[in-house]
Image: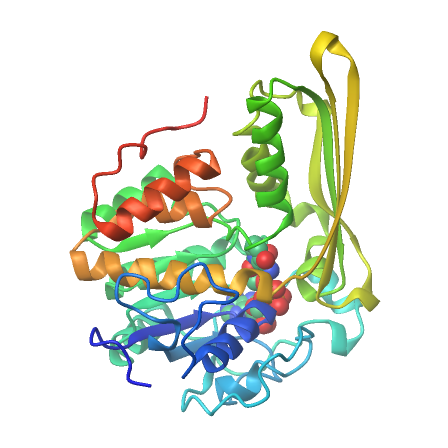
């Protein structure tokens, strides 16, 4: 099937873990198909999923560095489902990344097949990464580092900015939602989408939509929790609570932002709760919401959601990447508000999901976004 006329979107990846595995598998899976099953958009602004091609990749794991991206995505400790039998060689070799705070100390306590094994190779300097981004003709760099990688994320974001490459931040280190970083990208005319990818049918969007429903139906929400368990390296990494500060803020604010009345801190508990190795990339989420109906009569709701964690975010990532490229085409720099609000948990501006969806579709159609500023109360 012929690709769209707009040409390829050249993608660089920082962190070839489970999310990158699902994304790269997805590019092969959707190539040559012509249906949008499992995707929010087949054609997004003239770009199809298989218009994305790999330009460069960095990781720090000895089992990934030096291998073609198509092989590295199946190397341990990656443990997500293989839903695409044949992933063609990308012709791009995973390069040694700059470690900084990407690997937490406690990761060394887990079995080898469960954890990161840092490679011995020389780490790149800032100029090496910038040069590689330029020489590879990357349009977009997606950040898939472990939660808590603040310095490493700032390193890669700074390199993208300098190279004029759009930055898509899938993790809860605040870049797009940090006014200083957003201003730097705006001044340079470089698009930025983030922060913290909001999975397709994940705990966050389900919890938000229900919270919004409580508000619209006049049900007072008194207390809620969201407990999550999983067995991938993301959950192992987050079992060290000191890495969780921004993740907790991101996930909690995503729900608080759509509540009719902000809940007291002690009445809302949201977070990764436990690492269960045998779950591998299966994530299970338990939500409880307690409220009051007409006449202050109490009610409660309990929900269990089970998903394969990484494919759940890959289609969203494909839309983030295509939006970043659209912004480049249109000469728009800085934080792309509609795409960030619809596709991320911690955008620069929070909206209800209805408003964010309307703003995103207006952005795609280049319509004035009347609801763009419908920020949550
Ligand atoms: N799955 C989802 O739906 C979802 C949703 C929101 C956010 N996220 C976030 O996306 C990120 C990626 O998730 P994942 O499941 O792929 O994690 P992962 O642990 O499978 O992958 C992280 C990868 O980064 C590599 N790495 C570590 N430090 C590095 C460095 N300094 N430079 C380059 N590479 C480095 C690791 O070797 C590993 O391959 C996590 O922060 C996760 O919280 C995922």
The total of numbered circles placed on residues is 0
- Residue at 58% from the left image edge and 20% from the top image edge: 262
Q: Is residue 118 visible to us here?
A: yes
| 190 shown above or below 219 | below
| 220 shown above or below 312 | above
**Side of 266 where 205 appears, left or right:** left
| 78 shown above or below 207 | below
Q: Position of residue 112 (x, y in %)?
A: 76, 77
**Ligand 1 sits in quadrant:** bottom right
| Colour basis | rainbow
Q: Position of residue 296 (x, y in %)?
A: 74, 10
- Residue at 33% from the left image edge and 63% from the top image edge: 322
- Residue at 23% from the left image edge and 47% from the top image edge: 186
**Side of 151 where 322 appears, left or right:** left
Q: Position of residue 114 (x, y in %)?
A: 75, 73
Dividing the picture into quadrants, the one containing residue 47 is bottom left
Q: Is residue 181 visible to us here?
A: no
| 278 shown above or below 364 | below
């Amino acid at each position: 099937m012929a690709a769209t006329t707009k040409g390829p979107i050249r993608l660089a990846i920082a962190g070839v873990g489970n999310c990158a595995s699902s994304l790269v598998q997805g590019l092969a899976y959707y190539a040559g198909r012509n249906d949008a099953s499992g995707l929010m958009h087949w054609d997004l602004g003239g770009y199809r999923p298989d218009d994305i091609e790999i330009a460069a990749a960095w990781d720090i794991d000895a089992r990934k560095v030096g291998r073609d991206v198509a092989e590295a995505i199946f190397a341990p400790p990656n443990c997500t489902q293989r839903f695409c039998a044949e992933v063609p060689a990308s012709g791009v070799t995973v390069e040694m990344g700059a470690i900084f705070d990407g690997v937490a100390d406690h990761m060394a306590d887990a079995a080898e097949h469960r954890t990161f094994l840092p490679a011995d190779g020389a780490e790149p300097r800032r100029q090496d990464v910038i040069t590689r981004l330029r020489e590879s003709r990357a349009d977009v760099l997606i950040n898939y580092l472990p939660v808590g990688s603040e310095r490493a994320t700032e390193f890669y974001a700074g390199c993208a900015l300098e190279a004029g490459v759009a930055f898509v931040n899938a993790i809860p280190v605040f870049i797009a939602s940090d006014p200083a970083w957003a201003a730097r990208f705006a001044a340079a005319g470089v698009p930025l989408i983030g922060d913290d990818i909001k999975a397709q049918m994940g705990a966050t969007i389900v919890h938000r939509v229900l919270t919004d429903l409580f508000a619209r139906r006049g049900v007072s929400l008194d207390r809620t929790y969201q407990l999550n368990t999983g067995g991938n390296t993301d959950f192992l990494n987050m079992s060290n609570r000191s890495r969780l500060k921004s993740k907790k803020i991101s996930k909690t604010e995503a729900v608080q932002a759509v509540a009719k009345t902000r809940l007291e801190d002690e009445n809302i508990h949201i977070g990764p709760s436990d690492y269960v190795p045998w779950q591998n990339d299966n994530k299970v989420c338990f939500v409880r919401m307690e409220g009051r109906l007409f006449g202050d009569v109490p009610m409660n709701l309990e929900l269990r959601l089970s998903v394969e964690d990484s494919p759940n975010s890959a289609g969203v990532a494909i839309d983030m990447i295509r939006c970043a490229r659209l912004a480049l085409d249109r000469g728009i720099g800085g934080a792309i508000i509609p795409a960030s609000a619809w596709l991320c948990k911690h955008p620069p501006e929070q909206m209800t999901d209805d408003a964010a969806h309307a703003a995103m579709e207006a952005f795609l159609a280049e319509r004035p976004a009347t609801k763009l500023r419908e920020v949550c109360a």
